[in-house]
Image (cartoon, grey):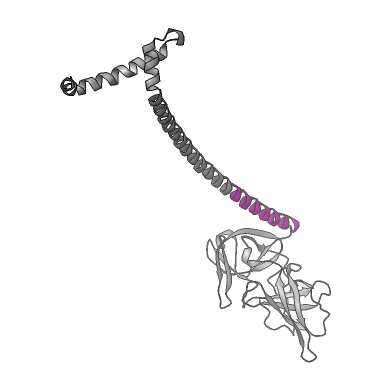
């Protein structure tokens, strides 16, 4: 008997593996009242195996569902992150466009308020703020657009500088903060005359040739006087700070905070014609006023 079982053990094993599931299937398919004693024995014997198998299958399915859900969640997170980045870029672009539109609106309003002048609008395409006092920006407008040397460059807030050199399609503007820049000004409150000279630093100028006897206080606003043959009168230049008036000497000294932050200028108006002063000679106490 044992020899027979040993001889056909593989065949018997295959038969058992086939018949047992079939028996379990048919036993489950019957109504409880229709099950025979053999059916109940088969179900009772295979119940632990069914539990283990069911537990394993459930675990595998749950694990697979979790994996799929995790992958979907990760893909969704990546997609949401991409959408957030796109929205942030669009928001930044809209903010930049709105800021540009506001700057241009101010320039247009400034130009419309002074119809006696003609302007050429230019965009800053280059910046040279050197440590040796060089303070120049390059515009995308040149001689072909009507720009010439010594023309004033302004924004709605005030003076930016004057055109220093020109090519056909570009021009360099010497900023009012450049060491070589000098602008004839008046104190808006008292009409006292002086010069504003650049220091080579983008955030500061100094006051030159302000007579010690003139009425001047910190906080006074300085505007172009129109006596240098370059800038028309009345353009904001800066504000007086750190005023020093010595007991001796002919002039008082002060620092000047420019009305325009030249480090942030992106668009300017070049005044191509204006009611410039009739090439007035500089006053005797202001040698070096630029022509």
Instruction: Describe residue 142's horizontal placement relative to residue 23 as left or right.
Output: right
In this view, 26 is above or below 241 = above
| Residue at the far bottom in the pictured view | 248
Instruction: Describe residue 114's horizontal placement relative to residue 164 as left or right.
Output: right
- The part of the chain drawn in magenta is 90-116
**Residue 129 x, y percent position in the rendering:** 57, 71
* Residue 147 showing in the rendered view: yes
**For residue 267, which quarter of the picture?**
bottom right
Q: Is residue 41 magenta?
A: no
Q: Quadrant of the C terminus?
A: bottom right
**Residue 165 x, y percent position in the rendering:** 56, 70
Residue sitting nearer the eye, 152 or 9 = 9
Instruction: Describe residue 282's horizontal placement relative to residue 171 as left or right.
Output: right
The structure residue drawn at horizontal position 40% and vertical position 29%, both measured from the top left corner, is: 52
**For residue 32, which quarter of the picture?**
top left
**Residue 225 x, y percent position in the rendering:** 75, 72
Provide the major secondary structure of the magenta segment.
helix
Q: Is residue 110 magenta?
A: yes
């Amino acid at each position: 008997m044992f020899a027979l079982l040993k001889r056909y053990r593989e065949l018997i094993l295959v038969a058992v593996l086939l018949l047992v599931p079939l028996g379990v299937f048919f036993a489950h398919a019957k109504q409880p009242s229709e099950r025979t004693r053999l059916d109940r024995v088969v179900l009772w014997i295979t119940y632990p195996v069914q539990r283990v198998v069911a537990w394993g299958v459930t675990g595998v399915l749950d694990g697979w569902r979790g994996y799929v859900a995790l992958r979907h969640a990760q893909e969704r997170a990546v997609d949401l992150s991409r959408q957030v980045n796109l929205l942030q870029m669009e928001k930044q672009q809209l903010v930049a466009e709105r800021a540009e539109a506001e700057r241009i609106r101010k320039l247009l309003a400034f130009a419309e308020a002074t119809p006696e002048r003609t302007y050429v609008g230019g965009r800053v395409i280059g910046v040279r703020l050197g440590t040796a006092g060089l303070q120049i920006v390059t515009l995308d407008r040149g001689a072909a657009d009507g720009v010439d040397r010594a023309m004033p460059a302004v924004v709605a807030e005030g003076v930016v500088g004057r055109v220093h050199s020109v090519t056909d399609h570009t021009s360099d503007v010497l900023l009012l903060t450049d060491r070589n820049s000098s602008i004839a000004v008046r104190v808006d409150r008292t009409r006292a005359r002086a010069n504003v000279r650049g220091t080579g630093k983008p955030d500061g100028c100094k006051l030159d040739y302000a007579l010690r006897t003139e009425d001047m206080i910190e906080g006074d606003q300085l505007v172009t006087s129109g006596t240098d043959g370059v800038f028309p009168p009345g353009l904001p230049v800066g504000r007086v700070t750190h005023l020093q008036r010595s007991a001796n000497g002919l002039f008082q000294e002060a620092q000047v905070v420019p009305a325009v932050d030249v480090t942030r200028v992106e668009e300017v108006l070049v005044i191509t014609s204006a009611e410039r002063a009739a090439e007035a000679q500089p006053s005797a106490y202001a040698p070096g006023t630029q022509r």
